[in-house]
Amino acid sequence: MADNDLYMVYHGLLLPKIVHSEESLKYLENFQVKDDDVFAVTYPKSGTTWMQEILPPLLNGGDLTSVETIPNWDRAPWLEETRAALVLDKLPSPRAIVSHMHYHLMPPSFFKSKAKVIYVTRNPKDVIVSSFHFHQMASFLEDPGTFEEFTDKFLSGKVFFAKWTDHVKSWQKPELGDRIMYITYEEMLQDLRGVLSRILKFLGRELSAEALDRVVDHCTFKNMKTNKMSNYTLVPQEFMDNKKSPFLRKGIAGDWKNYFSPELDAKFTAVIQEEMKGSNIRFPWDEE
Ligand code: A3P
């Protein structure tokens, strides 16, 4: 069972109480999406912080001031979190906004708007490894127990924002047409510049080659790890203990191989495959 002191339940989703409240969710429901808003939507641990680093400079002509001076949670706020009401209305447009919400829980105004969405997916095996460490370092999340125990919770959706498969399937929405772009964390690792160029095209924006190079360089794992505005060292240790595990931990693909026994791998793969059946989505990691 999830710890009621730590989580609230919203339409079946467990949400950490430290940053979610009745008021923050009311704010989300009543939020007026603007046509030029850009959302990065992710299941937790799939590259949200990375997108909070990437989107502001792509939207403002390559200026890195905001990523160097404003914490990620105020620079590209979470729509569902308590900070949203304090900062979102003051953000200059076009706004970069992040969200972990499942599709049907987006505010009504989103569906009527022309706002664009970049949906980032990551190999769920690496998501769970990242999440396991995050649960160990963050006091506002339930103790994950052993990796095997945490896998059971993850697969049954008894973790924040529920099941990975439901999240991913919920955002497969042909009706969004050219309002949505799908990218993977793994593609970003392989060719960050190429992905940023695709995002610019999707957003109908341009940057000079030099400006793009600067943004790419700024958004590498090595450089983000030393950026206080993005590495979560501004959060007091009692909430996030970077000594237990840094938030920007490894930043690689395939770390799951260090955690999954062959038996656990078989079980995990079988559950995910069964739940993704009929969805017609093929991910690069499905071929592994
Ligand atoms: P690891 O724990 O595997 O290192 P989120 O921001 O959605 O919570 O995701 C966090 C994960 O994204 C962490 O994964 C973190 O290190 C990784 N990440 C953040 N910025 C990154 C970057 N520039 N390059 C690669 N990985 C990055």
Image (cartoon, helix red, strand yellow):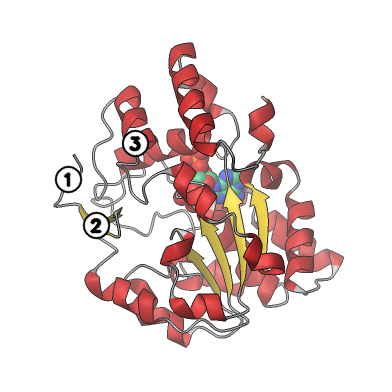
Quarter of the picture holding the N terminus: top left
Q: CA distance from mark 3 to mark 1?
A: 15 Å
Q: Which residue is mark 3?
A: 156
Q: Of label 3 and label 2, which has the lower sequence position?
A: 2
For residue 279, which quarter of the picture?
top right
Mark 1 vs ligand 1: CB under 8 Å? no
The amino acid type found where label 1 is placed reads: Asp
- Residue 254 badge: none
The residue drawn where x is 15% and y is 50% is 4
- Residue 287 appears left or right of 251: right
Q: Which residue is mark 1?
A: 3
- Residue 132 appears left or right of 190: left
Looking at the image, residue 163 lies above or below residue 74: above
Q: Of label 1 and label 2, which has the lower sequence position?
A: 1
Residue 88 image offset from top left, x and y in percent: 44, 80
The amino acid type found where label 3 is placed reads: Ser
Q: CA distance from mark 1 to mark 2?
A: 11 Å
The residue drawn where x is 58% and y is 47% is 121
Q: Of label 3 and label 1, which has the lower sequence position?
A: 1
Q: Work out whether residue 222 can be spotted.
A: no
For residue 112, which quarter of the picture?
bottom right
**Circle 3 Cα neighbour tier, 10 Å, few/some/many (<14 / 14–19 / ≥20):** few
Looking at the image, residue 110 lies above or below residue 147: below
The amino acid type found where label 2 is placed reads: Val
Looking at the image, residue 161 lies above or below residue 26: above
Tag in front: 1 or 2: 2
The residue drawn where x is 53% and y is 21% is 257
